[in-house]
Amino acid sequence: MELQKIKKYIRIEEVSQEEIDALILRVNNCSWRQTFHIQPISGLLNDPNGFCFYKGEYHLFYQWHPLGPFHGLKYWYHTKSKDLVNWENAGIAIKPDAYFDSHGAYSGSAIEHDGKIYLFYTGNTRDENFIRNPHQCIAVMDSDGTITKLEKSVFDKVPEGYTEHFRDPKVWKEGERFYAVIGAQKTDEIGCVGLMSSSDLLEWNFEGELTTKLDHFGYMWECPDYFEIENQGILLFSPQGLEPKGDNYQNIYQSGYVLGEKLDLQQKELTHGSFVEFDRGFDFYAPHTMQDSAGRRIVVAWMGLPENEYPSDINGWAHCLTIPRELSVQNGKLVQKPVQELQYLRKGKAEAAGTLSNEKKTYDGFSGVTYELICEIESGDAVEYGIEFRAGEEEKTVIKYDAAQGKVILDRSLSGKEVGKGYGTERKCQMPGGKIKFHLFVDTSSVEIFVNDGEEVFTSRIFPDIKSREIRFFAAGGCAAFKAVKWDF
Ligand code: FRU
């Protein structure tokens, strides 16, 4: 095997504690470590997996390559929380050590059954010629948190008509039967979603492809998720292979959804509207949802993208998850709002209000590295208005409304260390002007901006200098009125 491949498949169990400690020390010394986001202790994090609520706690797992910031042998790492805000690391949940997951415990989901949590995931295997064969596997978590894999996989082949890219089952129960959507690629290299079903979670049947209106829509659909909100069916997935179109599809890969009638399980058909990009920022992929005991549908995503390099790589780690967001449907659109528990993070409060014109304004208490900021701007006759944050002498990240274009624009051209080279430095989306509300969650190396109460969200990593802390409000070409409130975290 080539050296690169060997390096990718080194197991954490084979590495000495000294080596691991040295790596963790390097990671902990990185100035871009996050403070309120789930991040790996070392190495690379990608998709959120197995999000569920069980015995009074939220459990959230993620794809983890422990030994470096690249996509190697994947483990499931386990985190848990009582309030969706304070997360505790609970260690490795699934090791890729069986014949059915020897080359990675890939993405999957969770469901409670018979008082236990069933984790349904894809086991990635490769034979001696490096040919991939995915298995679908089950691990069971009992009430004391012990996770045990079944001895055999529950589905060990790729159905006729599909390629080796057959993975990421998302399971739910309807009546007496379990169903799962699974990401797939057809042999003609077209992405789609498959439907599987089971009476007991142990034996699975492949029902066939879900019929949608999206023909020839990318070459692979990863991490599908099906759920219902107020009798509407929503299929969320991450298609690969879409070409940029206007302001859309600017990242290497996309995440989005179709919304429509409830899925017709008999016909395996989804009647729906057009595909909508779920997030407008630079770094967002593989969103994964759960329903909690209060009936809320909550989503978490990977705040990163495959195949991009990130500035923290040199310090031995990459990526984090987004904050949890509650989903609702408003006017036929999926809306995301930060879960209300995030208010537990709020500490010192600052407020400001006034008018804005060409001169940029700063206010007492309005600076920092990790905080929440809500700012409402009434445009008046200004043509461009918004906020510069994580700003210093040379650096700034800008969120603004451009009235001439009728668009909200996130500009990270001066956000610090470059990231996502080749994919542009601005992200935009159309929105009606007038009054705009920007709600920001800023961590050491990220920002999540909820526009107009979550109608649109811009999620992005940024890598500014720790000294770039200013917050400046501005309006150009006229006057605007604004009020803002900020909480330190
Ligand atoms: C998406 C993905 C999944 C796969 C996992 C492997 O980012 O490629 O399709 O299960 O990551 O880590």
Image: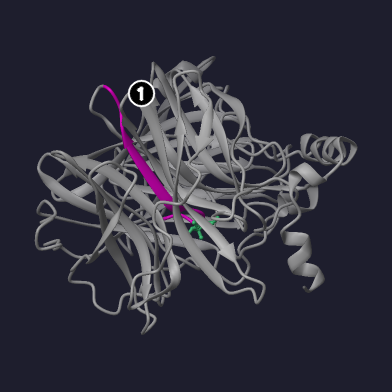
* Residue shown at 56% from the left, 54% from the top: 101
* Badge count: 1
Circle 1 sits on which residue?
A: 340
Image coords of residue 371 (percent x, y): 54, 28
Residue 477 located left or right of residue 146:
left
Q: Quadrant of residue 273?
A: bottom left
Q: Is residue 290 rendered magenta in the image?
A: yes
Q: Position of residue 167 (x, y in %)?
A: 43, 60
Looking at the picture, does residue 363 appear above or below residue 390? above
Question: Vertical placement of 120 versus 124: above or below?
Answer: above
As rendered, which of 142 and 39 lies closer to the eye? 142
Nearest the camera: 451 or 176?
176
Is 170 included in the stretch rendered in magenta?
Answer: no
Residue placed at 43% from the left, 48% from the top?
108
The scheme the figure's colours follow is: one colour
- Tell me residue 468's x, y (percent): 69, 40
* Start-end of magenta stretch: 280-293
Q: 10 Å neighbourhood of mark 1: few (<14), some, or many (≥20)?
A: few
The answer to whether 179 appears left or right of 345 in the picture is: left
Q: Quadrant of residue 255?
A: bottom left
Q: Is residue 431 visible?
A: no
Q: Quadrant of the N terminus?
A: bottom right
What percent of the width, then of the height, locates residue 301? 45, 46
